[in-house]
Amino acid sequence: MAPVPQNGQVARPGWRWFLDEVSNNVYRARLVDAAGRTVETTGSDPAALLSWCQQAAADIEQTLKAER
Protein backbone atom coordinates (compact mmCIF):
# COMPACT_ATOMS: atom_id res chain seq x y z
CA MET A 1 0.00 0.00 0.00
CA ALA A 2 1.26 3.51 -0.82
CA PRO A 3 2.38 5.76 2.03
CA VAL A 4 -0.15 8.15 3.51
CA PRO A 5 0.36 11.68 2.10
CA GLN A 6 1.15 14.70 4.26
CA ASN A 7 -1.64 17.16 5.13
CA GLY A 8 -2.62 19.32 2.18
CA GLN A 9 -1.05 17.05 -0.44
CA VAL A 10 -2.99 15.68 -3.37
CA ALA A 11 -4.15 12.16 -2.50
CA ARG A 12 -6.32 11.75 -5.59
CA PRO A 13 -6.34 14.02 -8.65
CA GLY A 14 -8.30 17.11 -7.66
CA TRP A 15 -8.58 16.16 -3.98
CA ARG A 16 -6.42 17.29 -1.05
CA TRP A 17 -5.81 15.05 1.98
CA PHE A 18 -6.06 16.04 5.64
CA LEU A 19 -5.45 13.78 8.65
CA ASP A 20 -5.88 14.89 12.26
CA GLU A 21 -5.31 12.83 15.39
CA VAL A 22 -8.43 13.60 17.43
CA SER A 23 -7.63 11.24 20.30
CA ASN A 24 -4.86 8.80 21.13
CA ASN A 25 -4.48 6.69 17.95
CA VAL A 26 -7.86 7.89 16.59
CA TYR A 27 -7.75 9.87 13.36
CA ARG A 28 -10.19 12.01 11.36
CA ALA A 29 -9.40 11.75 7.65
CA ARG A 30 -10.75 14.08 4.96
CA LEU A 31 -10.43 14.61 1.25
CA VAL A 32 -11.55 18.02 -0.03
CA ASP A 33 -11.90 19.01 -3.69
CA ALA A 34 -11.62 22.48 -5.26
CA ALA A 35 -15.42 22.93 -5.10
CA GLY A 36 -15.39 22.24 -1.36
CA ARG A 37 -16.92 18.78 -1.54
CA THR A 38 -15.65 16.72 1.39
CA VAL A 39 -15.49 13.06 2.28
CA GLU A 40 -14.61 12.27 5.88
CA THR A 41 -14.25 9.26 8.14
CA THR A 42 -12.72 8.36 11.49
CA GLY A 43 -10.66 5.37 12.61
CA SER A 44 -7.30 4.10 13.83
CA ASP A 45 -5.57 3.06 10.57
CA PRO A 46 -4.56 6.05 8.43
CA ALA A 47 -3.88 3.90 5.34
CA ALA A 48 -7.34 2.32 5.55
CA LEU A 49 -8.91 5.75 6.07
CA LEU A 50 -7.11 7.05 2.97
CA SER A 51 -8.40 4.10 0.94
CA TRP A 52 -11.97 4.68 2.16
CA CYS A 53 -11.79 8.41 1.37
CA GLN A 54 -10.38 7.76 -2.10
CA GLN A 55 -13.23 5.35 -2.88
CA ALA A 56 -15.83 7.80 -1.55
CA ALA A 57 -14.33 10.58 -3.70
CA ALA A 58 -14.47 8.28 -6.74
CA ASP A 59 -18.14 7.57 -5.98
CA ILE A 60 -18.89 11.31 -5.85
CA GLU A 61 -17.11 11.87 -9.17
CA GLN A 62 -19.06 9.02 -10.76
CA THR A 63 -22.37 10.44 -9.49
CA LEU A 64 -21.52 13.91 -10.81
CA LYS A 65 -20.64 12.49 -14.25
CA ALA A 66 -23.92 10.55 -14.37
CA GLU A 67 -25.90 13.72 -13.59
CA ARG A 68 -24.42 15.64 -16.55
Image: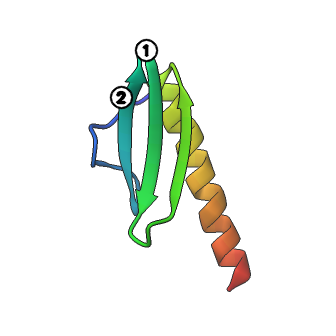
**Left or right: residue 55 compared with residue 15:** right
Q: Which residue is mark 1?
A: 25
Q: Which of the two residues, 45 or 27, is positioned nearer the viewer here?
A: 27
Question: Please, what secondary structure does the residue beneath circle 1 have?
Answer: loop
**Measuring 72% from the left and 81% from the top, which residue is drawn there?**
67
**Left or right: residue 42 compared with residue 9:** right
Which quadrant of the figure contains the C terminus?
bottom right
Outermost residue to the bottom: 68
Q: Give the answer, above or below, for where 8 lies relative to 43.
A: below
Tell me where residue 59 sits by quadrant.
bottom right
Question: Please, what secondary structure does the residue beneath circle 2 have?
Answer: loop
Q: How many numbered marks have been drawn onto this rendered protein structure?
A: 2
Callout 1: few (<14), some (14-19), or many (20+) C-alpha neighbours within 10 Å? few
Location of residue 60 in the rendering, given as x and y in whole percent from the top left corner: 63, 62
Amino acid at circle 1: Asn
Q: Which residue is mark 2?
A: 3
Mark 2 or mark 1, earlier in chain: 2
**Measuring 56% from the left and 55% from the top, which residue is drawn there?**
57
Amino acid at circle 2: Pro
Q: Which of the two residues, 31 or 59, is positioned nearer the viewer here?
A: 31
Callout 2: few (<14), some (14-19), or many (20+) C-alpha neighbours within 10 Å? few
